[in-house]
Amino acid sequence: MKIKITFDSDGAYGYPKGTIITGKELVNDYIDCLNEVEDADTINFLKHSEIEKSVDFVAQMWGLSYDVIPDDTVIRKCTVCDKTITSGYVFDGTDCFCSKECATSFFDDDEGCVEILLDEGERLIWNDSLPTAPHYKVGIGADNPNNFFYCDTKEKLFEWINRKVFQTVKDWYDIEAYNTQHKFAPIEVILFNPKDYYDHRRQYVSNVRKCEDIVQRALCIARSPKRDSLLKEFSRAYNDADSIWDMYPEVWQGEI
């Protein structure tokens, strides 16, 4: 259960309006205060009641108002101020901003740039419901599976790249400049929704392994209708793997 604080009567409990926390965190904060006065009965009540009832009790005692956040609501952090948000401005599907001020700060305080991007409505867009943060698949060259990396933040992405190329690459422009100089082993980054990644990856690997198994079986059989049948089966499995790779390029790690 997650809640968003909409009102704190006196601001004394450190929950500014808009704060997003779990119900358990709120209850535990209250219990920590009760421990100081050894209120065992109330502590026992809070620990053994349904979380909704416990949260409501704490909210009444502390004069808080709150909204329950549905389980499927995406919660992200503002790229600039690190505030937890469920709505805001999104730039290129990656960076999120809680306000126009934070978006302006991100663009080196260029308010005109932000206004132009908002007017165009393509790259910088207000979202009542934030999209899931993209994950990244990065590869350097295509001949070594060890040169692929799957991560969930830009920070991890660039840290990994820098370890591999032994130079500082800090943003997309640096990647473009690096690729201009290293055309035979470029840095390739794919952004994708992580929700279905493992299912697609599993399907892809299953077909690749099926191809490998069929080849080994076919090598042990002399030319015959049975071997021809195996080769047709191989072709289908290969095409299936290739189709998955075509639709979801993040699944590939140099297998075929």
Image (cartoon, rainbow, N blue to C red):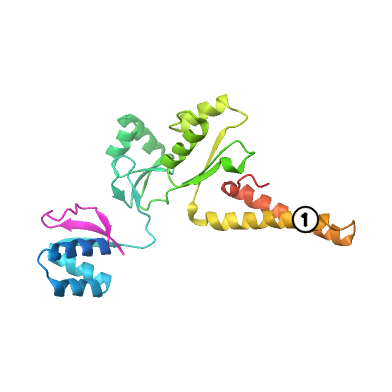
Residue shown at 65% from the left, 58% from the top: 206
Relative image position of residue 61 (x, y in whole percent): 13, 66
Q: Give above or below for 201 relative to 118.
A: below
**Is residue 15 within the magenta segment?**
yes
Could one spot residue 49 in this view of the protein? no
Viewer-proximal residue among 144 and 141 = 144
Residue 202 falls left or right of residue 195: right
Relative image position of residue 37 (x, y in whole percent): 9, 66
Could one spot residue 96 in this view of the protein? yes
Viewer-proximal residue among 100 and 63 = 63
Viewer-proximal residue among 199 and 209 = 209
Q: Residue furthest top?
A: 181
- Magenta stretch: give its range: 1-23
Q: Secondary structure at mark 1?
A: helix
Residue 70, image quadrant: bottom left
Viewer-proximal residue among 104 and 38 = 38
Residue bearing mark 1: 216
